């Protein structure tokens, strides 16, 4: 996980998430690429080609000027956290945000994507109808979405991973454990049991044995009929921010 991709729209939420991206990049000994995607206005109905070219060039110039100012702000954030020496480059690309982010992550062989989420107060808001949610679903590498309200305290000591004990979850847990080891963090493998309790306990027992060599791994079973409600409640009660 040597290359970190940080998509940004230069909003306060993105600048807030940049602090996480910087510290994570330092922790893994990697390099960070900031990425800004922009879309020209759709003015195909304009009949005069020369005017079209003029408008597009004007938009591009304005975007680039804003981009330069915003990159300078990111540099100041890095300096404020004494991380200005990190290997860092800045990229601006034309196109829809999701497509640009996914293509860049694939092209650059990014090991991690870190991005901010605006107004995401729960799992539903993160995963449904958000750019971060779609990136999480489609990216070919892990994605860390940072809520606006999250406060970085220079440490990540507890991580919760929700699981249904599916085969693909085993690989996900291996990646989570690798990430957790960077910070000596404790990992809770969390399952919301909406089925037979005995069956849930059997699944946990299998995974306990499978991952017995990870002393920082714990298992938690919650009985509930609504998965998102149960997970949000657990996150709030355990203050997993």
Image (cartoon, grey):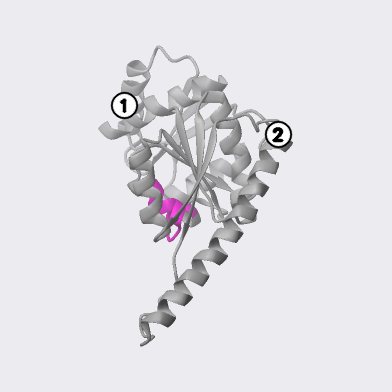
- Direction from residue 7 to residue 237 in the image, left or right: right
Say whether residue 114 is magenta. no
Query: Which is more N-terminal, label 2 or label 1?
Result: 2
Residue pictured at 59% horizontal, 44% vertical: 17
Residue 240 location, quadrant: top right
Which is more foreground, mark 1 or mark 2? 2
Q: Point out residue 50 in the picture as x, y percentages from the top left corner.
A: 40, 80
Crowding near the residue tagged with mark 1, few <14, some 14–19, many ≥20 C-alpha atoms within 10 Å: few
Quadrant in the picture for the C terminus: top right
Residue lying furthest left = 167
Q: Position of residue 26 (x, y in %)?
A: 58, 27
Q: Is residue 18 above or below residue 220?
A: below
Q: Secondary structure at mark 1?
A: helix
Dot label at residue 202 = 1
State yes or no: discs 1 and 2 in contact (Cβ < 8 Å): no
Q: Hey, which quadrant is residue 22 in on the image?
A: top right
| Residue range of the region highlighted in magenta in the rendering | 126-136
Tag 2, which secondary structure?
A: loop
Residue at image position (41%, 37%) is 142
Residue 197: x percent and y percent?
A: 36, 35
């Amino acid at each position: 996980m040597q290359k970190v991709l940080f998509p940004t729209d230069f909003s306060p939420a993105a600048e807030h998430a940049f602090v996480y991206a910087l510290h994570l990049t330092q922790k893994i000994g990697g390099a960070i690429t900031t990425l800004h995607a922009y879309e020209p206005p759709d003015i195909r109905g304009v009949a005069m080609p020369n005017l079209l070219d003029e408008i597009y060039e004007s938009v591009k110039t304005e975007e680039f000027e804003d981009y330069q100012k915003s990159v300078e702000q990111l540099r100041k954030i890095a300096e404020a956290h004494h991380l200005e020496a990190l290997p860092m480059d800045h990229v601006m690309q034309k196109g829809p945000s999701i497509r640009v982010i996914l293509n860049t992550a694939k092209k650059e062989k990014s090991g991690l994507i870190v991005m901010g989420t605006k107004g995401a107060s729960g799992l539903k808001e993160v995963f449904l109808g958000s750019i971060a949610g779609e990136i999480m679903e489609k990216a070919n590498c892990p994605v860390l979405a940072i809520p606006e309200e999250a406060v970085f305290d220079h440490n990540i000591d507890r991580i919760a991973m929700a699981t249904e004990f599916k085969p693909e979850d085993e690989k996900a847990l291996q990646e989570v454990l690798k990430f957790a080891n960077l910070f000596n963090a404790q990992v809770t493998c969390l399952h919301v049991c909406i089925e037979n309790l005995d069956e849930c306990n059997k699944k946990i027992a299998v995974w306990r044995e499978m991952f017995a060599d990870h002393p920082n791994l714990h298992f938690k079973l919650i009985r509930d009929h609504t998965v998102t409600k149960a997970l949000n409640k657990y996150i709030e009660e355990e203050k997993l921010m």
